[in-house]
Amino acid sequence: QVQLVESGGGLVQPGGSLRLSCAASGNIFGVNEMGWFRQAPGKQRELVASITSGGSASYADSVKGRATISRGDAKTVHLQMYSLKPEDTAVYYCNARVRVIGFGTVDRWGQGTQVTVSS
């Protein structure tokens, strides 16, 4: 069984920063692309940033210049966000394409972590 566990959400003041982390565990042979999505109330889930196993990153226009995604090791991903705005408020979800031992490649989601930007 493969799990993604997220950490680092919370309440942040406008202009502040935070770091989200996600770790994959289980019978994992490897992890391909990892990413962060977010979903605000009443809105569709959207991609925030993603990074390949080789370290190539991409960002949504709404966070370019205010976010950095990185791979801590082969099974972890971090999202550092700066200059946070109230519109960044959402539940943030980690996503990963995981190579499972003896099973193949599967797409997995974390449970989500709430980020609230408010004074």
Image (cartoon, rainbow, N blue to C red):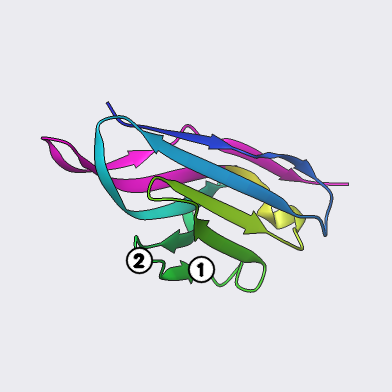
Q: Position of residue 23 (x, y in %)?
A: 46, 39
Residue at 39% x, 45% y is 75
Residue at 52% x, 68% y is 60
Q: Is 68 positioned to the left or the right of 34 in the image?
A: right
Neighbour class for label 2 at 10 Å: few (<14), some, many (≥20)?
A: few
Q: Earlier in the sequence, mark 2 or mark 1?
A: 2
Q: Is 36 positioned to the left or the right of 97 in the image?
A: right
The extreme top residue here reads 1
The local secondary structure at tag 2 comes to loop
Neighbour class for label 1 at 10 Å: few (<14), some, many (≥20)?
A: some
Q: Position of residue 4 (x, y in %)?
A: 42, 35
Q: Is residue 117 visible?
A: yes
Distance from disc 2 to disc 1, alpha carbons, whole Å, reads 16 Å
The chief SS type of the magenta part is: strand
Amino acid bearing label 1:
Tyr
Q: Quadrant of residue 90?
A: top right
The extreme left residue here reads 102
Q: Quadrant of residue 42?
A: top right
Q: Inspect the magenta stretch and tell me whether residue 22 lies in it.
A: no
Q: Is 76 positioned to the left or the right of 65 in the image?
A: left
Q: Magenta part of the protein: which range? A: 92-119
Location of mark 1 (residue):
59
Amino acid bearing label 2:
Gly
Location of mark 2 (residue):
54
